Image (tube, grey):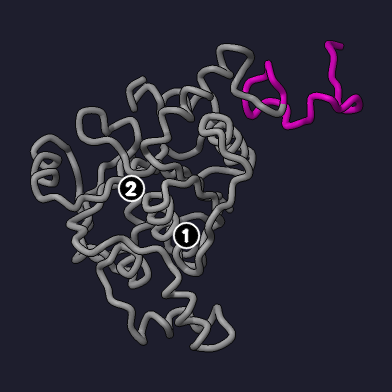
């Protein structure tokens, strides 16, 4: 499948509210130049957060290219290797921790990109054919959509159980970096920053899948659709369909 076909299937079968986001980390200038020569992209006018960059991709369908100078969130800059560990980063986590020593340990335990990141692209999954293969695919979705993605990932990659990685104050930025570096599925709630700034006031859950594993997850979804339907909770029904256990004898409906 092309990435456009993947997006169309996901939007139709999982009833996604937002476009899946393809995330690409650029460390090579030639790759950046090649992307810029082919893509119809936008850049932030003022420094904004990484989760705000993603708003343009998932809500407006825009391809966004951002650099260190465009990134206004110190936590994201730290995760992306654009900022050193310092007292300011410790203090920004003080409200979450028991003391500054704990804040320092927690910040230092975050997974960060290596130095040398030139820029980041966030784009609707369906817009990247011919541009790049994603490093991660990031979903903002509800609980049951997240469950379906998790179950398909486990089946497709023969992984069980899943152990998501949640870090303080860095859900979107830190979540994508963790999945990219460790090549692992991640599912985590919005952090305080992304809830306030990243428009997740509907209570969306972050699901992040490494790019190289994503086609296998899509193949698994396609296989289930061809056998029954996209619904795991009620095979044969369209998803979301009846969010009811197929074995429940009580919640049943019939033609009047």
In the image, residue 107 sits, relative to residue 235, either above or below, namely below
Q: Secondary structure at mark 1?
A: helix
Image check: 189 left or right of 123? right
Mark with earlier residue (1, 2):
2
- Judge whether residue 246 is colored magenta: yes
Residue under circle 2? Answer: 56
Q: Secondary structure at mark 2?
A: helix
- The span from disc 1 to disc 2 (Cα, nearest Å) is 18 Å
Quarter of the figure with the N terminus? top left
Main SS category, magenta section? loop
Q: Residues within 10 Å of mark 1 (few under 14, many from 20)?
A: many
Q: Residue at x 35, y 64 (%)?
A: 112
Q: Nearer the viewer, mark 1 or mark 2?
A: 1
Q: Residue at x 68, y 19 (%)?
A: 237
Instruction: Decide which of 116, 48 is in the foreground and name it.
Output: 116
Residue under circle 1? Answer: 171
Q: Position of residue 107 (x, y in %)?
A: 44, 75
Q: Position of residue 61 (x, y in %)?
A: 32, 39
Q: Which residues are magenta?
A: 234-256
- Total tally of numbered discs in the picture: 2
Q: Position of residue 83 (x, y in %)?
A: 27, 73
Q: Residue at x 14, y 40 (%)?
A: 35
Q: Position of residue 121 (x, y in %)?
A: 25, 47
């Amino acid at each position: 499948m092309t990435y456009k076909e993947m997006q169309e299937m996901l939007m139709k079968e999982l009833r996604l509210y937002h476009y899946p986001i393809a995330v690409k980390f650029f460390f090579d200038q030639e790759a950046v130049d090649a992307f810029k020569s082919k893509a119809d992209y936008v850049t932030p006018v003022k420094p904004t957060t990484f989760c705000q960059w993603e708003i343009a991709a998932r809500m407006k369908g825009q391809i966004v290219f951002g650099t260190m100078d465009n990134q206004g969130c110190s936590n994201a800059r730290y995760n992306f290797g654009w900022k050193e560990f310092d007292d300011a980063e410790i203090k920004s986590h003080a409200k979450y921790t028991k003391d500054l020593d704990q804040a320092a340990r927690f910040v230092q335990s975050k997974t960060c990109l290596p130095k040398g990141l030139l820029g980041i692209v966030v784009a609707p999954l369906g817009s990247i054919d011919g541009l790049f293969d994603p490093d991660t695919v990031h979903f903002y979705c509800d609980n049951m959509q997240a469950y379906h993605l998790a179950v398909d990932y486990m089946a497709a990659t023969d992984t069980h159980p899943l152990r998501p990685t949640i870090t303080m104050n860095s859900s979107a930025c830190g979540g994508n970096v963790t999945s990219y570096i460790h090549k692992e599925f991640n599912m985590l709630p919005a952090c305080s920053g992304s809830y306030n700034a990243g428009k997740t006031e509907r209570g969306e859950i972050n699901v992040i899948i490494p790019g190289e594993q994503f086609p296998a997850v899509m193949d698994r979804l396609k296989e289930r659709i061809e056998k029954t339907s996209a619904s795991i909770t009620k095979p044969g029904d369209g998803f979301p369909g009846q969010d009811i256990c197929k074995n429940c004898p009580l919640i049943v409906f019939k033609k009047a």
